[in-house]
Image (tube, rainbow, N blue to C red):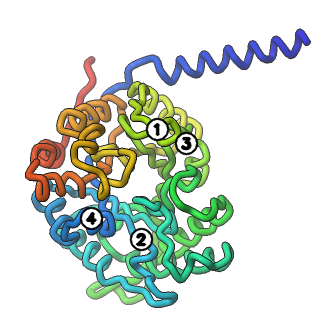
């Protein structure tokens, strides 16, 4: 019994020390910050916007040069074996022409509700049959775009270990198959004139594996990915409690975890979702503006940006560029759009004192 008590006390002491490590201290400011945005064609259309117009506005008016481009299985393969790449071709070609870097999200769970965008024809397939179709989809995408000059990074699935969304299964072994497939296909590239016609081997692009920023230590994501992607949300609707909550986590919470990942796995942590839109009890399309502004308005946006800067991390993709454009175009509220412009019209440089 005494031994058990000593072990329990030891565990509690360790947890207290670890909690202090995560919550105490001030991260050093990043010397240079890269800002980007997420973009989903489906989400943009659901907001009642012209997705091409919105995409161009993000690149040309807002000045975005780093974009996390979300693909959706049901848009690319609406019928089994019938692939439609016309829209994605246009998005990637436009990025190529404008010198924009793309983080391309691929797989079944790619982000935006319902998270897993399974076509109707595939919903009743067995798990094994679904996985075969997903691998075919990934192969088609990687082979089609591996020579694009704008593809900078792949993201395989979105928060694959986090139980959020309407998804039929979680399978770490299958995720490993997806990652291995992307790396093997991306390690080779075809070349076009005036380059030699023979294929040239090269190192595959890094792969991002994302996880919850508030509910994970990112260890599993670091084991699978070359880069860890994390979320960063501040005020959200907490369904389990039926109320809004404000995450009381300090900037150092993210910084300390990122330092552990770097020291243990030698891998970088980036923020692939920085909250820049509302998160309420209903989807945006069904939520009144008054309800939306409970979790996102100009003041909240400014606070989230300042919070991000204090974490010491150096790469952030805004989750909500489409909504910010919707506010400007459909609600005649351009304030957040104008504020966001400040991020993309210059590179923020911070030099620590001393």
Element at label 1: loop
- In the rendered image, residue 258, in percent from the top left (x then y), is placed at 48, 36
Mark 2 or mark 1, which is nearer the start of the sequence? Answer: 2
Q: What residue does disc 4 label?
A: 44
Q: Earlier in the sequence, mark 2 or mark 3?
A: 2
Please say if 301 is above or below 102: above
Where does label 1 land, which residue? 242
Pick whichever, 11 or 321, lies toward us.
321
Residue 18 pos. (x, y %): 59, 21
Instruction: Find residue 72 and name its label.
Output: 2
- In the image, residue 274 sits, relative to residue 128, either above or below, namely above
Q: Horizontal placement of 332 versus 107: left or right?
A: left
Gap in angstroms between the C-alphas marked 2 and 3: 25 Å
Q: CA distance from mark 1 to mark 2?
A: 30 Å
Nearest the camera: 182 or 83?
A: 83
What is the CA distance from the residue labelled 4 to the residue labelled 1? 27 Å
- In the rendered image, the quadrant that contains the N terminus is top right
Labelled pair 3, 4 in contact (Cβ < 8 Å): no
Q: Residue at x 27, y 17 (%)?
A: 354
**Residue appearing at x 61%, y 78% in the figure:** 124
Binning the other alpha carbons within 10 Å of mark 2 as few (below 14), some (14 to 19) or many (20 upward) gives many
Foreground mark, 2 or 3?
2
Q: Is residue 192 left or right of residue 62?
A: right
Q: Which residue is mark 3?
A: 218
């Amino acid at each position: 019994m005494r031994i058990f008590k000593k072990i329990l006390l030891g565990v509690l002491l360790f947890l207290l020390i670890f909690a202090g490590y995560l919550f105490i201290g001030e991260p050093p400011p990043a010397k240079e910050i890269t800002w980007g945005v997420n973009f989903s064609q489906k989400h943009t259309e659901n907001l009642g916007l012209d997705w091409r117009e919105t995409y161009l506005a993000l690149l040309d008016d807002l000045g975005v040069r780093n974009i996390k481009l979300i693909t959706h299985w049901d848009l690319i393969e609406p019928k089994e074996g019938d692939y439609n790449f016309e829209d994605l071709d246009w998005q990637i070609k436009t990025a190529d022409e404008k010198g924009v870097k793309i983080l391309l999200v691929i797989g079944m769970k790619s982000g935006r509700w319902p998270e897993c965008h399974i076509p109707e024809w595939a919903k009743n397939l067995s798990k094994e049959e679904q996985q075969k179709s997903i691998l075919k989809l990934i192969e088609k995408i990687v082979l089609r775009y591996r020579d694009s000059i704008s593809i900078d990074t792949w993201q395989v699935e979105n928060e694959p270990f986090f139980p959020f969304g309407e998804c039929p299964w979680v399978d770490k072994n299958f995720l490993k198959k997806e990652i291995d497939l992307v790396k093997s296909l991306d390690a080779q590239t075809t070349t076009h004139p005036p380059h030699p016609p023979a294929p040239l081997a090269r190192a595959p692009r890094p792969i991002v594996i994302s996880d919850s920023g508030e509910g994970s230590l990112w260890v599993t994501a670091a084991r699978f990915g070359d880069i860890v992607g994390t979320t960063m949300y501040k005020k959200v609707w907490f369904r389990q409690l039926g109320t809004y909550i404000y995450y009381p986590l300090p900037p150092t919470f993210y910084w300390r975890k990122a330092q552990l990942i770097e020291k243990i796995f030698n891998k970088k942590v980036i923020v692939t979702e920085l909250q820049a839109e509302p998160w309420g009890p209903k989807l945006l399309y069904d939520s009144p503006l008054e309800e939306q502004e409970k979790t996102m308005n100009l003041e909240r946006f400014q606070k989230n940006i300042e919070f991000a800067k204090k974490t010491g991390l150096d790469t952030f993709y805004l989750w909500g560029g489409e909504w910010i454009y919707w506010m400007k175009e459909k609600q005649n509220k351009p304030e957040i759009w104008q504020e966001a412009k400040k991020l993309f019209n210059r590179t923020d440089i911070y030099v620590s004192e001393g």
